[in-house]
Amino acid sequence: MPARKLAALALGTVAVAGLVNVPVSQAATGDPVAFTGTVDTQIPLDRARFTLRADLPATETADLTDGAKVDMLKLPTTGISTTGNSFTVAVAPADVPDRYVGSNGLVSLELEIYDPQTDSYAWTTQSVRLVGGEPAATRFATARSWTDPLASGRTPTARSAASRAPEVKVHLGKAPKGLKAALLPRTDTCTITKTGQNDAWATIGESFPAAPGFGTKRGTAWMTHRNGSEVTFGAAITTDGTKWSASGSASVANTKGFDFQWDPDTNPNIAYRTEVRYFKYTYDCGGVIINRRLKAVSETGGVKTIHVDANPPHWLSRANCTFDMPAGTWTKTTGKTYSNSGGVKISSVIGIDLSTSRNYTTGSTLSYKMDAGHDSLCGNTDKPGYAPKVQQYYNRIQEEL
């Protein structure tokens, strides 16, 4: 077995040798790109030190108890390249054992950046999907690649996946006090520990049924969220223990064994929510706490409906609408990703809300009942089949244009 593979299989307490000793300015491998990013300063990253790890999937960590140490896989940083304040992370699929590949091929990566010249530090997390080829242990491993979990379609080819790498924005701030000294030892002194958990409600979809218009009844809408559907939830970090900031995201597959279809609803402004479980982690090196992290691990199985106390949007335009549709059920299963920058309602815990994103698929749909009194649909950015959000209108609405 190659030495690189043997190193990848070494599990347990995590180390920061890569963070201290491996400056990266040029990729040394031809491995496929997993994700790219930019730090929010003009500090060049050519002398920065990187550490890259893979987290275990939710099926292995969902029952983790408080105080437990977290097994993470330390990955080679030879595939990381930098240009100015931007970076590209390439990872050999063969370096990621099956144990770290979750449902639907999801792999959760975590990246640390430390710039010793400015004593600056950043952490982010990003989920990527392993696609193409065969399992990593076969001779077809080089055909495997990475793609954004939110890219349209779940099985792009390895070649097309190269242009679908997710992009992250990372805050590069002042390093925690004592970080430089904590990183000096050559021995492995760093650990990640689960310290708590919180459940939060997250908006994963919205609908806007039509007003009665020229009729007497309102339009109706509903949503489905089936077993296997995925949602991407924002993650957060604090380096001082008090002020949290959003950093990266984790894609979670609904594998808790539940399907749900909301009943048709006539409220003009509806938010569909699922309950998500977040774990809190503490990361320390030699007794110095480097950061505390908050990351989604699974859905709890709970869902709810929120009737939003606000006027519905108004997206009426000939460019974004389709009119005079026949009676029937219109269901959205494709199109641009639904996203909500404050979708995860967790500000009561960390002072800020976090984002949600999800694809429309056959298991994650939005439906409207179309009839003679409600025969028009409008998207917020394009026609309804392409737009991330869709609103229903009553008949003859086009006469108001």
Image (cartoon, helix red, strand yellow):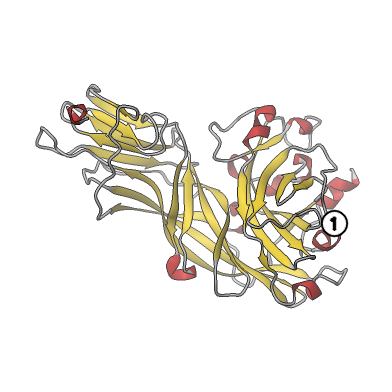
| Above or below, 93 relative to 160 | below
Quadrant where the N terminus lies?
A: top right
* Residue drawn at point x = 63 percent, y = 56 percent: 40
Q: Is residue 282 visible?
A: no
| Above or below, 329 relative to 7 | above
* Residue drawn at point x = 10 percent, y = 32 percent: 214
Task: Give x and y (percent) for residue 381.
Answer: 39, 35
Q: Is residue 267 left or right of residue 87?
A: left
Task: Give x and y (percent) for residue 67.
Answer: 63, 73
Task: Give x and y (percent) for residue 22.
Answer: 85, 56
* Residue drawn at point x = 60 percent, y = 40 percent: 148
- What type is the residue that disc 1 sits on? Val
Q: Is residue 165 left or right of residue 361?
A: right
Question: Which residue is outermost to the front?
Answer: 42
Q: Is residue 76 left or right of residue 336?
A: right
For label 1, count other residues whose C-alpha is less than 10 Å away and answer few (under 14), some (14-19) or many (20+). some
Please tell me whether mark 1 sits on a helix, a strand or a loop: loop
Q: Is residue 173 visible?
A: yes
The answer to which of 48 and 351 lies nearer the viewer is 48
Q: Quadrant of residue 220?
A: top left
Q: Is residue 127 left or right of residue 2?
A: left
Q: How many marks?
A: 1
Q: Quadrant of residue 238?
A: bottom right
Quadrant where the C terminus lies?
A: top left
- The residue that disc 1 covers is 22
Task: Give x and y (percent) for residue 170.
Answer: 63, 56
